[in-house]
């Protein structure tokens, strides 16, 4: 109950004191009247004092009592029970309140019950029954229908009086008209309800206003965060642009230096030889210097051309079966004189058996020569370089381990980036353009392998590990038939039970129908189960309906490109193909295209046009890494 409701009058409206006073006054009078008419019948053994008064004064006393009852502003009544249900007395107020005369009311024994409001009769009957049967005092508030149809609220209090032997004698009581109080209560309740309604409306309005304010605050905070994020991105983009500009400037300066330095020696010694006679020793020395610097300049130019081909996607490989041990021995033989001149010991641990791989012999030699020459160049006098080859599942692991200057942990993540050098200052101890390792990484990946660098820190040596897939029986047979000038045998275009593509389920995505059919045909001949779609939405639908082992997708497609497709795929849960190995197969061959595809979630990036052996090698390497639980 609210504090407001607690202030409302109770259902009876009249206090116990007021009721007691009214009841006592009316009851005492009625009991005296009852004793007058029926002396000797009351429960008290002492004769009523009214009897003596009547004997002395006659009926004047009764008249005075009746006059007194008529002054009470309520209906006072007396009902005798031992002569049938009938009313012996009702005060004249019955006519003022309900419009019935005393005679009408007394002549009809059930008039009172008949006038009770129909909705209150059942309750009143129960309350009256308690008085008749148990002798409990009656206190009831109910409605009565007046002669003119008005509804009058009564508060009635009555009690039953028994004779000396316990038999019911009569009931007397008083009924107060509390209609105005009830109306006032209804008005107060209505006002209370109206006030509650307005409070609720106001509360709801305030809550709505608060919600709107909170939403506005959230939106403003979001906008502020977006502005802050945008500012951070702009600052990061500016920082990266500044770094790129600095790297570009450093690279241009390095290129100028690295090209001019050998050119200076070549021109200088050539001028000396032309301008003045020289001894045979001097001529030999001059020619040696000229040849050495010309070869150095040729290497720089080849690296620049290779990077250009990588960026434009024009670097192509001529795949053939290659015995890796032989490639490694050739590199060791080439670098041994340089290592001995620096007093750097070369250690070699080759695999005991032949290690066949599918690759471009010249490019494989370029990979290992770059890594080996770096190891020798950055290893001080008295140090060592170890070159070891060991089988690793269906791959071969080639490690070049040196005891040289090591790699700073901060630079280690960028060691394979183009144009990046750990020391780009004018005081650096080593020359070069900083392109060798970037070329190595790209060439290794074109062979379907991976390369990574490890180093505990500066002056603690470094290790470079190259992992390449071993040559499968199919690739070896295909390459052999190509070398013989024969077309591939269709019967050979499927792996044996141990081959990587046998039974693999592959989804290929490309909007170009000719390219899509060509890739699918190659993969089917290799034993794979291939499904093809021509758009990103179709690919997502296919991945949601079936389980695939590999996804191969073009990047440039109408509607939604391959980068967005891969972003959505990687958002899927692991059990919903979110972790599926994926290869980007595209005509976009710039380095930024490759970086973008790998950043979006692809595990490998192949450039069109491609050789089937390239695709086979990349798929085999990726699937094997997936099976081995290695990072893809």
Image (cartoon, rainbow, N blue to C red):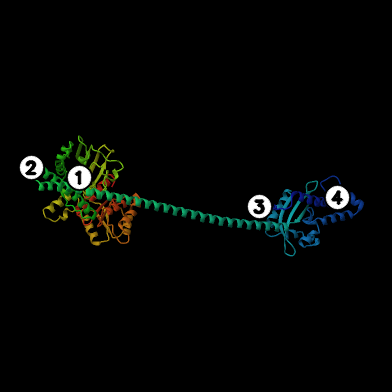
Q: Are marks 1 and 2 in contact (CB under 8 Å)?
A: no
x and y percentages locating residue 593 in the rendered image = 28, 54
Name the residue that disc number 3 marks.
Answer: 5
Q: Residues under labels 2 and 3: Cα distance?
A: 126 Å
Q: Residues under labels 2 and 4: Cα distance?
A: 174 Å
> Mark 4 or mark 1: which is in front?
1
Outermost residue toward the top in this view? 382
Q: Earlier in the sequence, mark 4 or mark 3?
A: 3
Q: In the rendered view, does 199 fall on the left or right side of 130? A: left
Q: Are marks 2 and 3 in contact (CB under 8 Å)?
A: no
Q: In the rendered view, does 468 fall on the left or right side of 85? A: left
> Mark 1 or mark 3: which is in front?
1
Q: Residues within 10 Å of mark 3 (few under 14, many from 20)?
A: few
Q: Earlier in the sequence, mark 2 or mark 4?
A: 4
> Mark 1 or mark 2: which is in front?
2
Q: SS class of the residue under badge 3?
A: helix
Name the residue that disc number 4 marks.
Answer: 39
Residue beneath the point at 15% across and 55% down: 489
Name the residue that disc number 2 marks.
Answer: 279
Q: SS class of the residue under badge 2?
A: loop
């Amino acid at each position: 109950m609210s504090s407001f409701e607690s202030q409302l009058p109770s259902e009876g409206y009249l206090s116990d004191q007021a009721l007691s006073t009214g009841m006592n006054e009316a009851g005492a009078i009625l009991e005296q009247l009852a004793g007058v008419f029926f002396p000797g019948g009351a429960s008290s053994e002492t004769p009523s004092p009214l009897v003596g008064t009547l004997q002395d004064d006659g009926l004047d006393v009764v008249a005075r009592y009746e006059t007194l009852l008529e002054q009470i502003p309520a209906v006072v009544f007396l009902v005798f029970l031992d002569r049938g249900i009938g009313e012996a007395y009702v005060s004249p107020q019955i006519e003022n309140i309900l419009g019935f005369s005393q005679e009408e009311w007394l002549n009809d024994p059930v008039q009172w019950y008949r006038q009770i409001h129909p909705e209150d009769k059942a309750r009143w009957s129960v309350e009256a029954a308690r008085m008749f049967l148990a002798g409990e005092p009656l206190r009831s508030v109910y409605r009565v229908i007046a002669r003119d149809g008005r509804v009058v609220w009564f508060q009635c209090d009555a009690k039953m009086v028994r004779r000396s032997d316990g038999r019911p004698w009569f009931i007397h009581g008083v009924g107060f008209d509390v209609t105005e109080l009830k109306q006032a209560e209804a008005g107060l309740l209505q006002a209370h309800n109206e006030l509650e309604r307005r409070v609720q409306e106001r509360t709801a309005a305030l809550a709505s206003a608060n919600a709107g304010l909170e939403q506005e605050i959230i939106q403003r905070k979001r906008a502020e965060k977006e502005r802050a994020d945008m500012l951070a991105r702009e600052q990061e983009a500016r920082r990266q642009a500044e770094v790129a500009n600095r790297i570009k400037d450093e690279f241009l300066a390095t290129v100028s230096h690295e090209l001019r330095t050998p050119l200076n020696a070549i021109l200088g010694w050539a001028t000396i030889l032309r301008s003045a006679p020289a001894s045979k020793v001097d001529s030999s020395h001059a020619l040696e210097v000229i040849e050495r610097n010309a070869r150095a300049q040729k290497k720089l130019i080849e690296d620049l051309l290779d990077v250009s081909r990588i960026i434009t996607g024009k670097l192509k490989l001529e795949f053939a079966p290659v015995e890796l041990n032989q490639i490694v021995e050739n590199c060791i033989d080439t670098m041994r004189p340089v290592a001995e001149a620096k007093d750097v010991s070369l250690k070699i641990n080759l695999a005991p058996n032949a290690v066949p791989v599918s690759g471009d012999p010249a490019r494989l030699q370029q990979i290992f020569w770059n890594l080996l020459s770096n190891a020798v160049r950055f290893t001080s006098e008295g140090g060592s370089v170890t070159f070891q080859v060991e089988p690793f599942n269906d791959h071969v692991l080639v490690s070049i381990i040196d005891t040289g200057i090591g790699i700073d942990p901060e630079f280690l993540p960028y060691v394979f980036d183009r144009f990046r050098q750990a020391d780009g200052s004018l005081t650096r101890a080593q020359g070069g353009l900083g392109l060798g390792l970037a070329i190595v990484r790209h060439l290794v990946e074109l062979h379907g392998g991976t390369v990574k660098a490890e180093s505990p820190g500066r002056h603690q040596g470094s290790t470079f590990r190259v992992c390449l897939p071993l040559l499968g029986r199919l690739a070896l047979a295909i390459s052999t038939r190509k070398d013989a000038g024969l077309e591939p045998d269709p019967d050979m275009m499927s792996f044996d039970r141990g081959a990587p593509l046998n039974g693999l389920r592959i989804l290929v995505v490309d909007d170009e129908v000719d390219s899509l059919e060509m890739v699918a045909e190659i993969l089917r001949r290799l034993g794979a189960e291939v499904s093809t779609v021509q758009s990103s939405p179709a690919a997502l639908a296919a991945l949601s309906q079936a389980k695939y082992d590999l996804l191969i997708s073009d990047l440039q497609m109408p509607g939604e490109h391959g980068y967005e497709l891969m972003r959505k795929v990687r958002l899927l849960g692991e059990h919903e193909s979110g972790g599926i190995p994926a290869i980007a197969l595209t005509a976009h061959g710039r380095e930024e295209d490759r970086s973008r595809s790998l950043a979006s979630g692809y595990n490998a990036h192949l450039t069109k046009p491609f050789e089937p052996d390239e695709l086979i090698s990349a798929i085999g390497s990726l699937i094997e890494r997936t099976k081995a639980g290695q990072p893809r």
